[in-house]
Image: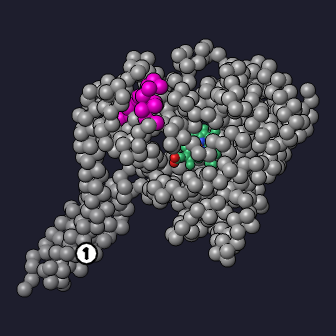
Amino acid sequence: MSYPTPSLHGLVTTVIQPFQPFLNSSNIMLHAASTADSLRSQPFLQQALQLLQPFLTLSLLFYIPLAYCGIYLVNMVIAELIMYYRLRTIPTVGTANFFTYFIDTWTSIWNTRDMVAEGYQKYYGGVYKFPQIGGWMIMASGTDMVDDIRRAPDDELSFNEALEDIFHTGGTIGDHVVHDAYHLNSLISLTRNIEAYIGDLRDEIVSSYNTNIPLTKEWTKVNVTNVGRSLITRATSRIFVGLPICQDPEYEANCINFILEVVPAAVILQLSPRLLAPVLIKMFANIPKRVRDGVKMLRPIIEERLAQADAGLDKEEMPNDMISWLIADAKGPQRTVEDLTSRILFLGFGSIHSTSGAFGSALYHLCAYPEYIGPLRQEIEDVIEQEGWTKIGISKMYKLDSFLKEASRMVGQSTYHVTRKALKDFTFSNGLVIPAGASVSVATHHMHNDERFYPEPEVFKGFRFYDMMTFKDGKPSHQMLTTSADYLSFGYGRHACPGRFFAVNMFKIVMAHLLLNYDIRFEEEGRAHPPVTAIGNAIFRYSDVPVMARARQT
Ligand code: HEM
């Protein structure tokens, strides 16, 4: 039995017609013609399937992804509507209209800081919300509410869930790293061993300075961001993975690129449907490659160290670095090269990004306020003479500590910190409620620049905290690493930065070496601290404002 096939050629080409702009038209038309020819000799079902084949292929290519994106958008809008309804009683900065809210989530990238400031002025002591990419952010202000956040247990206000929302940890840092955070124990070893490794830390800092800023009589132009990253990456890596790999430029570049790619990757994961994200990440922020390269570079060292540990080598006999501390704390599946490398990259992310940012702020403040250089040099020289480059010596650099803390107060790393996600409805002591699923944070920048806590907050007073210091049992108050409800650069409460003891020691050695060995100034003498740009919650310095440095002549 034969079937009429008079216009098969036309039928096949008609099906394909709408997709022609997307396709290589000559190929598909040839395929259509040959399909029509071959159909004439086929049984019905086969003919039908063959007839539909181009259409099915095109459906797979276009309709299914289109439907997927549609479902994704509908899902997202429903989730946003539910949250919009649940947050209706919390005052809003920006639009309170659901539809224009979507536009505001985008425009907020450029005016987050202004919105947070507006809410801080209007609703101080309470809460307010503003739109940002990823949904509403609720801000709490005033030290009482900050203390409520500090006291809240993790099953009410979760640090990890907030971290997951911000960094989309599954596709960036690794969920296993965040949710199985045994490395927090290893950070205790990092703090306990400061005295033991402080000589190595300084040695690496000196060596890195010599690579980055030549000690010559001529002035050299210094790119603050690049040099800061290099100094801190080398210093951190010396204590994390040791010599010689810490001085390998390829290893250094991989640590820095990992850090630079986490945020773009998190943005991609936030904005794109789950299925497309891996492709986009590969194209624009290749985190998996950074991890693979890290694994490749660290494998021989980690494998040797695991073998030493398995052979029963004592903790004291192992090299005194982060690899050994992690291995000592790791169990079962945590003892793999891949897992250990992910943690080293993650801890590097915590260390390098924030400490090099603080370095930039301190260096610009030193150039903008050169009158501090003399007294700081004097203090450092006196302390080194009495104590040497020891932990106790570094801790006695009180003026330097105060200067660095003041620089971080004025120009911090972000507009808001101490972000937590409510896992249950959370009630503040003043009765205000945050519904489950919402995120809450603290307007750190505005608290740090609030007259209530810091008189004349707009004035840079390098010795502000030094003047406030009191000594109880020999321990000074108001140090950079002391957290409090009104000083939040290191966060607050049980999740306050566990790396801050290491960070402050490293930062002080970096600055002390610079002060003792270099003269520094802005290229354009007498200029002020360059303005910073706030994009979303992040603060960016203008790295195109260079600093000039030469071997110390003064
Ligand atoms: C100037 C340098 C640094 C700054 C300003 C800084 C700041 C912060 C802040 C604000 C938090 C969140 C705290 C909270 O939400 O309450 C944090 C957490 C953290 N930081 Fe740092 N940090 C610095 C250096 C370091 C270093 C050197 C390391 C590692 C060696 C590190 C590792 C961590 C880790 C692992 C967490 C998460 C803590 C947890 O899971 O409970 N940070 N840091």
Residue at 9% from the left image edge and 79% from the top image edge: 3
| Amino acid residing under circle 1 | Thr
User: Residue reaching furthest left?
Assistant: 1
Q: Quadrant of the N terminus?
A: bottom left
Residue at 61% from the left image edge and 25% from the top image edge: 410
Residue beneath label 1, please?
Answer: 35
Q: Give the color scheme: rainbow, by chain, secondary structure or one colour.
A: one colour
User: Residue 253: where, in percent of width, then height?
Assistant: 67, 53
Magenta-drawn stretch contains 149: yes
Q: Nearer the viewer, residue 37 or 277?
A: 277
- Quadrant hosting residue 412: top right
Residue at 80% from the left image edge and 46% from the top image edge: 202
| Distance from mark 1 CB to nearest ligand 1 atom below 8 Å | no
Q: Nearer the viewer, residue 10 or 286?
A: 286
User: Residue 516: where, in percent of width, then height?
Assistant: 86, 34
What is the span of residues highlighted in magenta in the rendered image?
Answer: 132-150
Q: Can residue 533 be seen here?
A: no
Magenta-drawn stretch contains 478: no
Number of numbered markers: 1
Disc 1 secondary structure class: helix
- Quadrant hosting residue 4: bottom left
User: Residue 415: where, in percent of width, then height?
Assistant: 51, 30
